[in-house]
Image: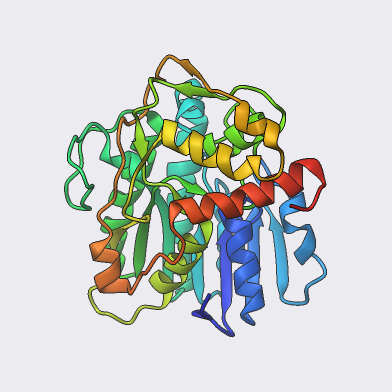
Amino acid sequence: MPMIIENRRVLVTGGAGFIGSDLTEALLSQGNTVVCLDNFSTGKRENIAPFLGHPAFILIEGDIRDLATCGHACSGIDYVLHQAALGSVPRSIENPLATHEANITGFVNMLVAARDAKVKRLVYASSSSVYGDSPELPKVEDRIGRQLSPYAVTKYVGELYADVFSKIYHIELVGLRYFNVFGRRQDPFGAYAAVIPRFAKDLIDHRRPVIFGDGSYSRDFTYIDNVIQANQLAAVSENPDASSTVYNIACGERMTLTDLFLALREALSAFDPEIGRIEPEYGAARAGDIPHSHADISKARALLGYDPGTGAREGLRKAASWYWETLTGLRP
């Protein structure tokens, strides 16, 4: 991966989470000072354990819902990569207030703190869930539908706040609509585990994974290295049209959940042939889920120079190796 951000001071909120810790690792390897802000409500201490002795790594254990903490974290920062959030559509349906507080109140706190600290640019994580019930494929940034979950609403409201802040306060803000990001450090445990780590753990444990719906729902699965590239490009792009807007970050291809299961089963069966004989179960579709997700990434290509280097199937093979070693302790 090219060294896009070098010798800067970068704040990664949610830096102990799946995406945040991978961003932190890349930025440290590129000679940056990285400030990690996390309250460990969903982030994992083991994700940042390898960085704790690094002289350029600074941990602030705090909450983005506290404005003073956000202000402290933004002091002296060049770029903010804002990943902190409460994810998961089902979690937002069960607890919309907590999702609102983290994803809206916490986000506005970060916007105010970044404005006051005069950071060069804040890049924030949005979501493909903002497209809601729009049937259009592929998804284009300026055409969305009605959101289908509290989580989706919070991500869309965040985009609206960012647009207003950029116009009123003239600060540089870039939103990245992630499409089903997966890869190393994504948590396979817990009630809100994403589909790929959940499938991987079930297969390694010789359990039949449950596919919600009939398996025809499709997603634009996006490997973590593509997201790391996109965040850095969004932070440093000097294209005058690149800031104060949102981008789809994906591979620009889609895969059904049944095809996902088959590809992951094939990758893991290379380590354990018994896995190749496991069949999925099918359950009821979940409330709030978008039936199909497929991104048009031409805007990110044109304005940021984004070029996803890892396709979904290659990423699944890499992720399968990571999950196999992590969950079994055996080298693939």
Q: Does 256 appear above or below 128?
A: above
In the rendered image, the vertical position of residue 123 relative to residue 19, given as above or below: below
Residue at 37% from the left image edge and 55% from the top image edge:
250
Position of residue 318 in the picture relative to residue 273 (left or right): left
Give percent across and percent down for residue 22.
Answer: 61, 60
Image position of 319 (left or right of 241): right
Q: Position of residue 35 (x, y in %)?
A: 64, 67
The mark tally for this picture is 0
**x, y (%) of residue 259?**
43, 36
Q: Residue at x 62, y 50 (%)?
A: 17
Q: Is residue 280 above or below residue 332?
A: above
Q: Which residue corresponds to the image point at 68% horizontal and 51% vertical from the top-left?
A: 322
The one of 143 and 99 positioned closer to us in this rendering: 143
Q: Is residue 245 above or below residue 240?
A: above
Inspect this view and state whether residue 327 appears.
Answer: yes
Q: Is residue 227 left or right of residue 185?
A: left
